[in-house]
């Protein structure tokens, strides 16, 4: 048999194996999603947007951005690295039963930014708005988080100190806490709630509660509203060896079903200044088991079921 004839009889797979492999699609720093998009697109520009956030995220380089081009429901998303989602106020994200609309399982030092999204749980069973399990920081801005049966934001960093910053955001009508800040393992949490409205949640507007010794929570709540929650406006609940320190400034804590401010257990401290605390059913402020509420004596505390006076622990400006 000639060499030419021999080559013609070789299996096609031999020649396929000799060809260079097609290069994998490179990740890009900016991707796009649209109601008219397709998940078979490359997501890389406004002419070829994808349909769902999960597809766009898979095509986005670390520290990249996902841009939403028009109103639609873009599906739930799990985030494992640094990214920014630019929702422009019309990106809707809904969960499936037993999950969160956005789940964050990122690495230490990864920064996640979520801007201009509407998360609506539509009362689906065991649904969360945002669940943060790990990462360096989470920033939520200009968003709405509502109608989840579990917490709207469940911030539970594990084995690291993580930062949460929420601003210009409504967290309402959730069947649990509006915002739950609950570190796990050796994790700790710090951050700011700025111009956040926590309204009509079934438990507390915001609950800050470590689980084991070695954890710590340090938060400032400023220019915010916690109102019409079935339990407390702000609950700081310490654990032995796990302190909780909260500063409430320039805020309104009103119409809650129990206490406006509640500090539970030794190590739980709430400092309040320039705030209005009114019409809370049980008390304007309360302490239990050596918790402390301190005032800078410049608050309006009136019309509550009890504790309408200045807290006995007072502070002065320096």
Image (cartoon, helix red, strand yellow):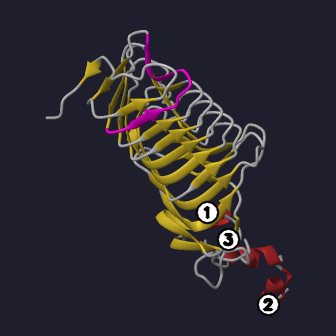
Q: Position of residue 280 (x, y in %)?
A: 53, 28
Which residue is farthest left? 318
Q: Nearer the viewer, residue 276 or 174?
A: 276
Between marks 1 and 3 in the image, the one whose residue lies nearer the viewer: 3
Residue appearing at x 56%, y 25% in the figure: 281
- Earlier residue among tags 2 and 1: 2
Residue 281 painted magenta? yes
Q: CA distance from mark 2 to mark 3?
A: 61 Å
Q: Are marks 2 and 3 in contact (CB under 8 Å)?
A: no
Quadrant holding the N terminus: bottom right
Which residue is the site of mark 1?
58
Residue at x 63%, y 75% (from the top left corner)? 43
Q: Nearer the viewer, mark 2 or mark 1?
A: 1
Q: Position of residue 92 (x, y in %)?
A: 67, 61
How far apart are the alpha carbons under marks 2 and 1? 46 Å
Which stretch is magenta?
A: 274-288
Please give the label number shown on residue 71.
Answer: 3
Residue 296 seen? yes
Residue 28's disc is none
| Foreground pick, 223 / 64 | 223
The crowd level at tag 2 (other Cα within 10 Å; few <14, some 14-19, many 20+) is few
Q: Which residue is mark 2?
A: 4
- Establish if 255 lies above or below 92: above
At mark 1, the secondary structure is helix
Badge 3: how crowded within 10 Å, few (<14), some, or many (20+)?
some
Main SS of the magenta segment? strand
């Amino acid at each position: 048999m000639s060499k030419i004839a021999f080559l013609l009889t070789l299996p096609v797979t031999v020649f396929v194996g000799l060809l260079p492999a097609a290069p994998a699609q490179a990740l890009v720093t900016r991707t796009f999603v649209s109601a008219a998009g397709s998940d078979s697109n490359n997501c890389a520009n406004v002419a070829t947007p994808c349909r769902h956030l999960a597809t766009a995220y898979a095509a986005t380089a670390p520290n990249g951005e996902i841009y939403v081009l028009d109103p639609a429901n873009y599906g739930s998303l799990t985030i494992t690295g640094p990214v920014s989602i630019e929702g422009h106020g019309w990106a809707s994200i809904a969960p499936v039963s037993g999950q969160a609309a956005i789940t964050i399982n990122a690495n230490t030092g990864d920064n996640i930014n979520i801007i201009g999204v509407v998360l609506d749980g539509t009362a689906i069973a065991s649904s969360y708005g945002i669940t943060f399990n790990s990462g360096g920081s989470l920033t939520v801005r200009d968003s709405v988080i509502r109608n989840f049966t579990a917490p709207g934001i469940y911030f539970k960093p594990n084995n690291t100190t993580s930062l949460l910053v929420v601003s210009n955001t409504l967290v309402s009508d959730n069947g649990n806490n509006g915002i739950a800040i609950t570190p796990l393992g050796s994790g700790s949490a710090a951050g700011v709630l700025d111009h956040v409205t926590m309204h009509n949640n079934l438990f507390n507007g915001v609950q800050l509660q470590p689980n084991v010794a070695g954890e710590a929570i340090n938060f400032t709540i400023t220019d915010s509203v916690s109102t019409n929650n079935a339990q407390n406006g702000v609950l700081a609940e310490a654990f032995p060896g796990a302190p909780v320190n909260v500063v409430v400034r320039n805020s309104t804590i009103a119409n809650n079903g129990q206490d406006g401010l509640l500090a539970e257990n030794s190590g739980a401290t709430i400092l309040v200044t320039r705030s209005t605390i009114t019409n809370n059913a049980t008390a304007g402020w309360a302490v239990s088991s050596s918790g402390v509420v301190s005032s800078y004596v410049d608050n309006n505390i009136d019309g509550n079921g009890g504790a309408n006076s200045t807290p006995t622990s007072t502070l002065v400006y320096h």
